[in-house]
Image: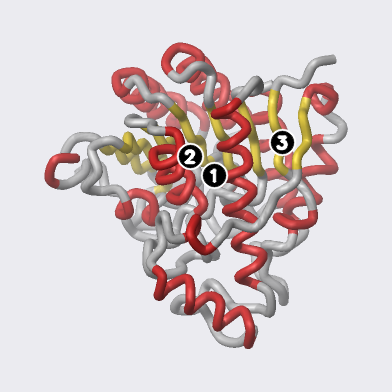
Amino acid sequence: MQPTEILITGAEIAAYGFPGGHPFGPDRHDAFLRELERSPCWARLERRGARAATREELEYFHTPDYVQRVIAASRTGQGFLDAGDTPAFPGVYEAAANVVGGALEALQGIMTGPLRRAFIPIAGLHHAGRDHAAGFCVFNDCGVVIEAARRRFGLERVAYVDIDAHHGDGVFYGFEEDPHVAFADVHEDGRTLYPGTGERSETGRGSAAGTKLNLPLPAGAGDAEFLAAFAEVEAYVDAQRPQLILLQCGADSLAGDPITHLAYTEAAHAHAAARLRALADRHSEGRLLAMGGGGYNRHNLARAWTRVVEALA
């Protein structure tokens, strides 16, 4: 059976997780993989490992001073990289660089073919800003991939779609003034959930005004509300005619997540992946990279991400 999709997996990205009972623990990778191995699509995946991103690659999105701060914190393994959500641990730089490198390997694969779709579970670290960590996110692989797609492959129009319960603020503010990055985010209202951003009125600045779409949903919103919002996302992405689509498919928007308040089922994630796959086939020569993102109920993330992989494969 010929592979239809790239899966980036392995110990390199599994190591990105925080110790001591932190919600983003290092067991998330294997919880997903155990579920995926039972899926009929397992045989259709081309499995590849990650590599460490270079400093030059990390600095596509991040400032040199910030990268150096992470290196220093990784050596001591002490303290926090932000105000208290993202602890340092020995080797955190290497683990975070592997996540970025894995996402870049996925990008390389889908840009050079013959496979055009890829999934990486431990990725989608959308809160990290250009000069800071935030919300369990050390380096923003999404931002690095967007920059790499433009620098390495000359793409002019990239669409980023985020269905994590939390607003993808690191990506949004990182490209808020960039008219060539289409941004669409369906998330829990910032009045009830971190990071408190992503109002519908936030549509971009300067020459990028009107190029960003934020769709906050109230706590308790389920599949019906999501499907209505995602119809708007589809129309928006379709109008942008992107050359590459990124999907951050955090599973913390499913009912039962311990730190969020939305109530989707895994069908929402399957729907989003299938609809974006169709748009990628229409505009992007099929090029679609999906990244796991958040999700702190292990059963939820295993099922939601497996459904995404199945929809892409």
Tell me the residue at 54%/72% (across/down).
86
Whole-percent x, y for residue 223 in the image? 52, 30
Image quadrant in which the N terminus is located: top right
Whole-percent x, y for residue 293 in the image? 57, 48
Residue 44 vs 119, above or below: the answer is above
Assess whether mark 2 and mark 1 are in contact (beta carbons under 8 angstroms).
Answer: yes
Q: Earlier in the sequence, mark 2 or mark 3?
A: 3
What amino acid is labelled 1 in the image?
Ser
Q: On residue 163, which mark appears?
A: 2
Q: On residue 7, which mark appears?
A: 3
Image quadrant in which the C terminus is located: top right
Front residue of 278 and 188:
278
Assess whether mark 3 and mark 1 are in contact (beta carbons under 8 angstroms).
Answer: no
Q: Would residue 47 appear left or right of 291 to someone viewing this image?
A: right
Q: On residue 253, which mark appears?
A: 1
Front residue of 260 and 276:
276
Q: Earlier in the sequence, mark 1 or mark 3?
A: 3
Residue 129 vs 48, above or below: the answer is below
Is residue 117 among what the camera can see?
yes
What amino acid is labelled 2 in the image?
Ile
Q: Would residue 184 appear left or right of 81 to someone viewing this image?
A: left
Q: At numbered mark 1, what does the secondary structure look like: helix, strand or loop?
A: helix
Whole-percent x, y for residue 253 in the image? 54, 44
Is residue 194 among what the camera can see?
no
Please name the colour scheme applied to the rendered image: secondary structure
Tell me the residue at 30%/48% (across/down).
175
Whole-percent x, y for residue 25 in the image? 70, 64
| Quarter holding residue 244 | top left
Q: At numbered mark 2, what does the secondary structure look like: helix, strand or loop?
A: loop
Q: CA distance from mark 1 to mark 3?
A: 23 Å
How many marks can you see?
3
